[in-house]
Image (spheres, rainbow, N blue to C red):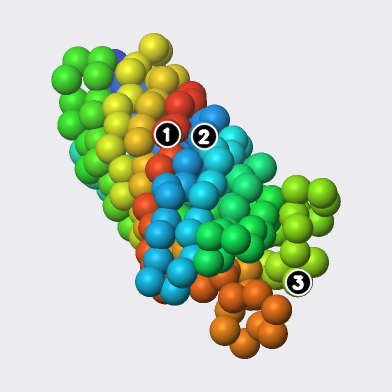
Amino acid sequence: MKKIVLVLFLLAVCVATGRTQESRQDVSLSGTALIPPFVASSTNVQVHSNAGYGALASYRFMLTPNSAIEANYGFTYDNTYRYVVGNTNVTKILTRTQEMSGAYVRSFTFRKWNPFVEAGPAGLIFLPVRNSGTTSIDAKQQTEIAGMYGAGFAYEISPSFDIRAEYRGLVSKVPNFGLGSGNTTQNLTTNKWFNLNEPVIGVAYHF
């Protein structure tokens, strides 16, 4: 009887140990750069932008050993959108950008290297900053529906941690910050979509 109890106890310990070693979730914190492209439009508006820098927090839940769903929140500071209308009138808007996105992630395993691809829907909030970097007092917060896609790799540095690097693209309408055709003084509408480039590098913790 004692032997049976001992065997059952050892089996329970083995099962519990196996479950604790099976990581089905991870969280990551990354540094990012948000790089908008140059945009020229049919409405006689050109958009020039600089790179902004920020952070991205992500949560992944593994559905299988090679597929997961992911939720992201990102915040980028100090993008300046410079609108040139008719080659003469210039409007500058200093912007903070918030991102909320979800994605399906497909990963592959090659020893300690884990390449992955992902895609899903996103929402972007463009927030004008009221300081000397913004030359229009009429600029308003704008929310746009977007699509997110990306590809990268994770390198395992321990059973619980890996380094993660990725290129992410965010496809969205070019914001006009509420300065569209209904505005009596400025019309910054481009009627264009653009691809925001976002390189990402950070650390993930598995649990």
* Residue position marked by numbered label 2 in the rendering: 32
Q: Nearer the viewer, mark 3 or mark 2?
A: 3
Considering only vertical position in the picture, is 84 above or below 42?
above
Q: Earlier in the sequence, mark 3 or mark 2?
A: 2
- Front position in the image: 85 or 34: 85
C-alpha gap between disc 3 and disc 2: 29 Å
* Residue position marked by numbered label 1 in the rendering: 199
User: Does residue 115 show up?
Assistant: yes
Task: Indicate the amino acid at tag 2.
Answer: Thr
Q: Secondary structure at mark 3?
A: loop
How busy is the neighbourhood of tag 3: few (under 14 within 10 Å), some, or many (20 plus)? Answer: few
Query: Which mark identifies residue 138?
Result: 3
Task: Indicate the amino acid at tag 3.
Answer: Asp
Q: Secondary structure at mark 1?
A: strand
Instruction: Check the image and name the residue furthest to the front.
Output: 88
Q: Secondary structure at mark 2?
A: strand
Considering only vertical position in the picture, is 53 above or below 171?
above
Q: Position of residue 133 (x, y in %)?
A: 75, 48
Task: Indicate the amino acid at tag 1.
Answer: Pro
